[in-house]
Amino acid sequence: MSSAPAEAQTLARAGASGVAWQSLAQVVSRALTLIATIVLARVLSVEEYGLVAAALVVIGFVETVADAGVAQALVYLPRRAGLVRASFAISLGAGTVLAGVVMAAAPAAARVFGQAGVEPLVRALGVVVLLTALAAVPDALLRRALEFRRLTYAVMLRGAASAGVTLTLLALGSGPWSLVWGTVAGAASYLVCCWLLAPRGVARSLWGRVDATDMRTTLRFGAPVAGNQFLSRAAFDVDYLVVGALLGSTALGVYTLAFRLPEMVIIQVCFVIAGVMYPLYTRARATPHLLERAWVVSTQAQVLFGLTAGVGLAVIGQDLVPLVFGTQWASAGDVLVVLALYAGVRAMANGANEVYKALGRPMISLWTSIARLCVLIPALVLGTQWGVLGVAFAHLATECLFVAIKQTIASRLLRLPPAAVWSMLGPGVLGAVGIAVVAGIVAQTPLSGWALVIVTVLGGLLVAPGLVLVCYPEVVTTLAAVMPGRAGAVVLRLCRPFTRTYAARHSRGS
């Protein structure tokens, strides 16, 4: 029988390997998406970009509940052929119904955004909902089996198909429709790839009678999760609805583009980590110490990355936007600064919902999401009085409040002492302060344009890790110990002088 430390190390390495593979997939996929976004921003007008953004917001809301939560249920529940059949039947039925609802509701969406051009785009994107639902079962089973390498191939193929079709059609003069059909192509390729890479025997397990008990068991867990996912997506995307409905498609185009970089650089990476950690949390839930340790280490990594990247993106945002997307988007620079800070703050409690679900308490996620929406929507509406920048500030303020709430709930459920909570947040805060100081110094130089951006980034990459290594060497060594391959060993060797100094200092203090 394996010891608890050995089991903890095994789970930690599995998590690190999963994050590494999924991060690779996101880097490739998001790089392709960024290229497509840059080209679209330079070819389409601000209003045309806003039309597609409005249609994608509608689809994004529906996609979150397309499978009725069966993907999360399959990760949590024991794997049985009956549950797999029930999950597939539920996802097929829900996806079909919701795709039809989307197509029927397209005229209403156009009225909400005040743009008739949104209607045909929403109708065409309705098929994405069904494709997403059909991919839910193989995706969930691959995650449950910790087969993140296979999922990496599927994610990379989706990014390549989406970007390839988008850029090809854009070159042929399809305008906004190029992004629509690129999105459909990406969803279709992901569906096919997931089924081809699914664990052995999954396709055969679909044949047979679907038991009503299995459907109830799946829905009992999946329905609250689906509700929470919808509310979480609403909390994440309701700002788009508010901007589009109250400020118009041009403002929505500016706001969407400003959100692109924080979303791709920070939020999507944190989503990857949370998605990897959920099946690990479910495996560790029988041993409270393992679950507590997994939460602490994963949060340390997310806060360290999210806060430093958020502050780093904020300090270069105003210069970066016109350089990358063109001068016609210069007004998005100020908005990007605030949204980058929002993305960094969001990382401080990212994954709390996965802890609630792993403990069999998905209703906590549901109620916190409802409370967040009740606060966020009035704040966003009030923020529109100051334009898209006011909306961004409202989003940031609300996130600060609910990060504190979610972190408090998770810490109490896991019975973490205040010192453990600070150990999760302290390194990221220190790294973010270091980057802000570097940016302040560089701003006093005569540098401008790409030179200013590059020097600021390089300075931040040197100072932030250095500060964390000197002040928190134990955190760096913990994260290095679970890194896959030789990367961890290299980092540990670099940390050795600092860990010795840290140990000597603390031994004298005791």
Image (cartoon, grey):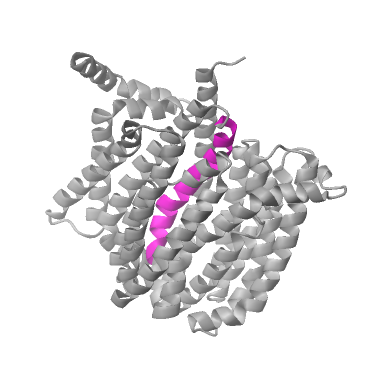
Q: What's the magenta bit mostly, secondary-structure-wise?
A: helix
Q: Residue 219 location, x and y as percent?
A: 69, 52
Along the line of sight, which residue is nearer the eye, 27 or 384?
384
Q: Nearer the viewer, residue 155 or 305?
A: 305
Q: Is residue 45 visible?
A: no
- Can residue 231 be seen in this snapshot? yes
* 12 lies above or below 219: above
Task: Name the side, left or right, on which 325 lies relative to 274.
Answer: left
Provide the residue span drawn in magenta.
Answer: 258-284
Residue 275 covered by magenta stretch? yes
The answer to whether 393 appears left or right of 273 in the picture is left
Q: Residue at x 56, y 60 (%)?
A: 230
- Kindly indicate the quadrant of the structure image that contains residue 305: top left
Residue 444 sits in which quadrant?
A: bottom left
Q: Is residue 48 above or below residue 198?
A: below
| Residue 340 position in % (x across, y down) | 34, 56
**Which residue: 51% across, 51% down?**
365
Is 80 colored magenta in this rendering? no
The residue at 36%/23% (across/down) is 492
